[in-house]
């Protein structure tokens, strides 16, 4: 395990922000840390970076214990804050060259590593100064900076927050690619982002982990239920099937049908043909992460 967080609690005065948090994060995985704004996600990440003292518990990263005010464990970490800051009059390449000097990267590695990272984040053809960058471009440059020295752990605090759909998709694609060389730990309150790329997901609610599991386990199939979409509207489809005794509901523009076995599914397909309903898609019904969260919070 790259990260081991054991019974971590954190108080600010009388307010307990983290309550006996325990997590393990496996190597070369993408770990989604979800929760509402104010749940304590950023506080835990600052504790992982040694920027805040723990009230109790311990954190180990790549075998090194994390100690407040000391940075030995941070040699294994790349960090992207929610709003990264840069020297505005540098280009992306110049800024990464400066970071390489500051971190004492061997000269023989600098040119090839910077080229590799600029290509990864889609900035290799950008020669303008950082002051002209969009929010999404700055986030991508921040990821390149965080990956510069090949960390064993990349921590990203809300990397897709405030980005448009294209920008979010770009960041998620970069994090997916980064998994080949590091472990990615990223926080988000956008559940669909975690759902797209994560191997494991944990949710923090009021300072407590309320679930942690592999995403595939959380998205288990809903037994005997299938999702149908049609060329016709779903309302038209349901109307034409109203005389049949199937358990049917409309959800997000699709028809959810309970079919107990293969024989019943084939019979339902024949009914669709007889009623001139043309299927656009069909697949087993799975629980979205959002529904898992709502079930747990109830």
Image (spheres, rainbow, N blue to C red):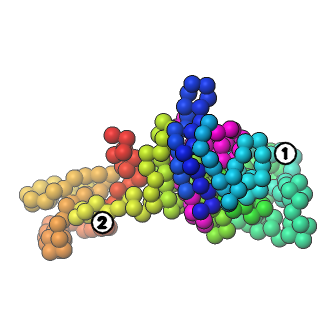
Tell me if residue 14 comes above or below residue 165 in the rendering.
above
Residue 2 at what x, y percent from top left? 63, 61
Using the rendered view, name the quadrant where residue 259 is placed.
Answer: bottom left
Closest to the observer: 30 or 65?
65
Closest to the observer: 239 or 90?
90
Using the rendered view, name the quadrant where residue 247 is placed.
Answer: bottom left
Residue 223 at what x, y percent from top left? 25, 63
Magenta-tinted stretch: 25-54
Closest to the observer: 38 or 97?
38
Please check the rendered image and state whether residue 53 is part of the magenta-colored stretch, yes or no.
Answer: yes
Q: Position of 214 compared to 26: left or right? A: left
Residue drawn at (40%, 47%), measured in percent from left and top?
A: 293
* Residue on which disc 1 sits: 87
* Residue 94 visible within the image: no
* Residue on which disc 2 sits: 284
Label 1 crowd (10 A; few <14 / some 14-19 / many >=20): few
Residue 265 at what x, y percent from top left? 18, 70
Please check the rendered image and state whether residue 43 is part of the magenta-colored stretch, yes or no.
Answer: yes
Q: Earlier in the sequence, mark 1 or mark 2?
A: 1
Q: Position of 210 compared to 45: left or right? A: left
Residue drawn at (83%, 70%), measured in percent from left and top?
A: 112
Looking at the rendered image, the quarter that the C terminus falls into is top left
Element assignment for label 2: strand
Closest to the observer: 185 or 167?
185
Residue drawn at (66%, 43%), measured in percent from left and top?
A: 47
Residue drawn at (86%, 56%), measured in percent from left and top?
A: 103
Label 2 crowd (10 A; few <14 / some 14-19 / many >=20): some
Residue 197 at what x, y percent from top left? 53, 61
């Amino acid at each position: 395990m790259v990260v081991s967080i054991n019974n971590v609690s954190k108080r600010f005065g009388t307010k307990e922000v983290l309550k006996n948090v325990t997590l393990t994060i496996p190597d070369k995985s993408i770990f989604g840390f979800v929760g509402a704004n104010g749940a304590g996600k950023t506080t835990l990440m600052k504790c992982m970076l040694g920027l805040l003292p723990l009230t109790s518990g311990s954190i180990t990263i790549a075998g090194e214990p994390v100690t407040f005010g000391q940075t030995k464990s941070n040699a294994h970490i790349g960090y992207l804050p929610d709003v990264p800051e840069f020297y505005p009059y540098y280009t992306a390449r110049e800024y990464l060259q400066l970071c390489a000097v500051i971190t004492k990267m061997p000269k023989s590695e600098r040119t090839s590593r910077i080229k590799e990272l600029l290509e990864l984040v889609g900035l290799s053809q950008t020669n303008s100064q950082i002051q002209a960058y969009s929010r999404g471009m700055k986030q991508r440059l921040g990821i390149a900076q965080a990956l510069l020295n090949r960390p064993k752990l990349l921590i990203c605090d809300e990397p897709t927050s405030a980005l448009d759909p294209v920008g979010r998709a770009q960041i998620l694609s970069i994090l997916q690619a980064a998994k080949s060389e590091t472990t990615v730990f990223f926080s988000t309150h956008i559940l669909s982002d975690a759902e797209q790329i994560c191997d494991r997901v944990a949710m923090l609610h009021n300072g407590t982990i309320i679930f942690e599991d592999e995403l595939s386990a959380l998205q288990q199939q809903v037994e005997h239920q299938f999702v149908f979409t049609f060329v016709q509207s779903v309302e038209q489809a349901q109307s034409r099937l109203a005389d049949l005794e199937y358990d049917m509901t409309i959800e997000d523009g699709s028809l959810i049908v309970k079919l107990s076995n293969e024989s019943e599914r084939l019979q339902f397909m024949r009914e669709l043909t007889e009623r001139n309903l043309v299927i656009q898609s069909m697949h087993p019904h799975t629980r979205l992460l959002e529904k898992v969260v709502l079930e747990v919070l109830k």
